[in-house]
């Protein structure tokens, strides 16, 4: 945890840590040293502008400008740490900032961690708030250590900041720390000053914390009000008067105790997850260390085998024998080196994670809600990032196996002995499917797998059953370890398995995994297969046409099994148009009304009546039409191989088409007098509706 308690500037334990708007902290003395006039930072930006051609300087320097933050005691408490994107194209950005921000904020600090520029008002670094939680943890940490490094050293406040000496006393009345020389010159033991009570620096620090703690409980703007609320918008504690009458009246304000409890709970939950992963990482590191012993043992056995085979050969093989043993030793050293390197990297990651855990636990012990909330958001972000990236950074799989998958062939003749070398003999081990990386979406599934540790694999073969418990069939062959299979049946459970292959043979199949496709179809209109006259909007859910002639467009999925229901909403309806709505094969002619050829089945309907049409055969005239706002529903039952229609929720006509076999796509044909929208992901009408239709 020591790394969390050291200033990134002086690399010493924090002394009077100040909290920057970027959520990093810095010692007060370090802040005073790195504080510069804001014009210094402006000149750096202008220097970049001058070095560029006209029109390029603004874009070049924009990333630096975006790193500027402004902090002032006179603002509303909202820290501005980003610039509007509209400044990108504004000529002479530097002049805008010089006339506004830089003139109002005479000082600046560049964060030593993220390099963001923090603009400060006339109070300079003193306008930064103290990181009270960090200061408290440093104090606790110092008491837990027996050495004398942390809190005994306090800088003199009367010395020049660049050459500040160690303070030896603190005046209780003046509330100032003095070194020996400044005490003699600025606070002599005579006159009225002789009555002042002088304390050693540690006692003075404790007295300051006690005074500040009582003061911090009151609102700075309304001194008689307690800080009992927390403004989420500004991320700062406020009083009730600020909430109702001040600048926070329109902000999201919560009770400070409840907010503190919520964020402590959130941090605790993330810490629990990260702690479990740290435990797994510790066990993994131990296994890595134990694997080095196995490498030694396996290497000894392998060396004996190689030596026995080489000793049985004629004189010509003796020279080769030494070369083979050297090769084995190099392989051993490589394995040990890689395992030790991985163990070292994992240990370093675990130390950082453990440090963050200990630090976060100490933060959770903070009893002052305002102090805790001052750092909780950034700490939650850090812990969340560490939690999310832990498995990836830890690499919980050894980079190399302990076994030596090599053998020596002693059968060839003398010519083969001159070129004798190791070669891969064993077939690959059984791969394993990674469940957390597998998924099912709509009518597609994604399967991910990983090879057996340390085995050479040339390709994989992924197999999928038919969704009904039938035979497996190959759907992918290649070297990738992830595959997405599209065009499956909806509401079906598929089993997948994979095997690995190299020159020596095939592995066993992996343990199968089952994936469930969606119960109902979610899809949009397909702009790629549609006629060019069709115009799409609303994420391809709405369509119209710029032609007076009918043009066909298809849905994005095809159906060959199951019961499916979707609806078409009439958004605009002019001139007694007669849209055709139905299903089609993928290669239907897109330049005519749906149902004119043998690859389309439709119901074309106007404002009074409708007909069914397939292969230009019109049938079953039905009274009742559509208007603006009407909804046409389609019930495609491929278990019974038939298509039925609904208008505004009621069955429309008899069963339209029967004996439907194969793959069908939702389809419709429209012209410029109509606009339609698609509704998908709908449950099919109840059985009673279907019976009524029959």
Image (cartoon, rainbow, N blue to C red):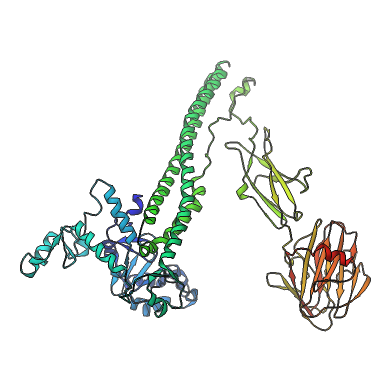
Q: Quadrant of residue 42?
A: bottom left
Between 688 and 404, the one nearer to me in the picture: 688
Q: Residue furthest bottom?
A: 575
Residue 345 on image: x %, y %: 44, 43
Question: In the figure, is residue 359 to the left or right of 307?
Answer: left
- Residue at image x 92%, y 69%? 616
- Up/down of 464 relative to 453, above or below: below
Work out whether residue 114 can be spotted: no
Q: Quadrant of residue 556?
A: bottom right
Between 448 and 54, the one nearer to me in the picture: 448
Q: Residue furthest left?
A: 190
Question: In the figure, is residue 593 to the left or right of 163?
Answer: right
Residue 410 on image: x %, y %: 62, 21
The quadrant in which the C terminus is found is bottom right
- Up/down of 358 relative to 286, above or below: below
Question: In the figure, is residue 584 to the left or right of 211?
Answer: right
Residue 197 on image: x %, y %: 13, 63
Between 180 and 468, the one nearer to me in the picture: 468
- Up/down of 14 relative to 221, above or below: above
Question: In the figure, is residue 521 to the left or right of 20?
Answer: right
Residue 221 on image: x %, y %: 33, 76
């Amino acid at each position: 945890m020591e790394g969390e308690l050291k200033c990134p500037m002086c690399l010493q334990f924090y002394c009077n840590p100040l909290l920057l708007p970027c959520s990093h902290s810095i010692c007060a003395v370090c802040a005073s040293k790195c504080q510069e006039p804001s014009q210094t930072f402006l000149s750096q930006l202008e220097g970049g502008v001058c070095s560029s051609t006209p029109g390029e300087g603004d874009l070049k320097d924009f990333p630096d400008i975006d790193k500027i933050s402004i902090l002032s005691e006179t603002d509303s408490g909202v820290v501005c740490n980003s610039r509007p994107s509209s400044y990108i194209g504004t000529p002479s950005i530097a002049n805008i900032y010089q006339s506004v921000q830089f003139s109002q904020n005479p000082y600046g600090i560049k964060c030593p961690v993220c390099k963001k520029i923090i603009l400060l008002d006339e109070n300079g670094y003193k306008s930064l708030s103290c990181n009270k939680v960090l200061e408290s943890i440093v104090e606790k940490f110092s008491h837990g250590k027996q050495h004398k490094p942390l809190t005994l050293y306090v800088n003199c406040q009367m010395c020049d900041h660049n050459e500040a000496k160690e303070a030896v006393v603190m005046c209780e009345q003046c509330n100032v720390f003095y070194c020996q020389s400044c005490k003699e010159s600025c606070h002599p033991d005579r006159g009225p000053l002789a009555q002042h009570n002088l304390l050693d620096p540690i006692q003075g620090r404790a007295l300051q914390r006690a005074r500040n703690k009582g003061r911090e409980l009151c609102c700075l703007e309304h001194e008689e009000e307690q800080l009992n609320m927390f403004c989420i918008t500004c991320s700062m504690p406020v009083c009730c008067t600020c909430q109702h009458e001040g600048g926070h009246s329109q902000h999201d304000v919560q009770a400070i105790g409840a907010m503190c409890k919520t964020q402590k709970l959130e941090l605790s939950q993330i810490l629990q997850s990260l702690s479990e992963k740290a435990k797994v990482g510790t066990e993994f590191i131990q296994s890595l260390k134990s694997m080095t012993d196995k490498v030694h043992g396996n290497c000894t056995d392998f060396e004996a085998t190689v030596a026995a085979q080489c000793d049985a050969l004629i004189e010509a093989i003796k020279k080769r024998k030494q070369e083979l043993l050297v090769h084995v030793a190099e392989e051993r050293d490589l394995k040990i080196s890689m395992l030790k390197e991985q163990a070292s990297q994992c240990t370093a990651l675990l130390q950082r994670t453990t440090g963050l855990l200990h630090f976060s636990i100490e933060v959770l012990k903070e009893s002052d809600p305002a102090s805790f909330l001052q750092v909780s958001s950034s700490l939650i972000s850090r812990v969340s990032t560490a939690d999310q990236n832990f498995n990836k950074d830890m690499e919980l799989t050894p980079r190399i196996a302990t076994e030596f998958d090599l053998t020596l062939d002693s059968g060839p003749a003398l010519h083969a002995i001159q070129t004798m070398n190791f070669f891969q003999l064993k077939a690959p081990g059984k791969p394993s499917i990674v469940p957390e990386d597998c998924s099912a979406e709509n009518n597609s599934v994604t399967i991910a797998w990983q090879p057996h540790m340390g085995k050479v694999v040339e390709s994989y073969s992924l197999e999928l059953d038919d969704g009904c418990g039938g035979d497996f069939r190959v759907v992918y062959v290649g070297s990738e370890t992830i595959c997405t299979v599209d065009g499956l049946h909806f509401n079906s459970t598929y089993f997948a398995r994979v095997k690995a292959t190299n020159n020596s043979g095939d592995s066993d199949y992996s343990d199968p995994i089952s994936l469930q496709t969606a119960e109902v179809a979610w899809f949009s209109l397909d702009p790629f297969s549609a006629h060019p006259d069709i115009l799409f909007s609303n994420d391809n859910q709405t369509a119209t046409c710029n032609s007076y002639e009918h043009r066909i467009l298809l849905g994005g999925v095809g159906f060959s099994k199951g019961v499916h229901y979707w609806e078409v909403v009439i958004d605009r309806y002019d001139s007694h148009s007669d849209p055709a709505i139905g299903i089609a094969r993928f290669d239907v002619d897109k330049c005519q009304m749906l149902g004119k050829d043998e690859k389309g089945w439709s119901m074309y309907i106007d404002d009074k009546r409708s007909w069914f049409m397939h292969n230009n055969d019109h049938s079953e005239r039905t009274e009742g039409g559509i208007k603006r706002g009407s909804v046409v529903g389609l019930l495609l039952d491929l278990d019974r191989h038939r298509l039925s229609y609904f208008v505004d929720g009621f069955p429309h006509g008899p069963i339209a088409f029967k004996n439907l076999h194969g793959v069908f796509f939702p389809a419709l044909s429209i012209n410029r007098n109509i606009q339609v929208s698609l509704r998908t992901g709908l449950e099919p009408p109840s059985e009673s509706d279907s019976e009524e239709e029959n």
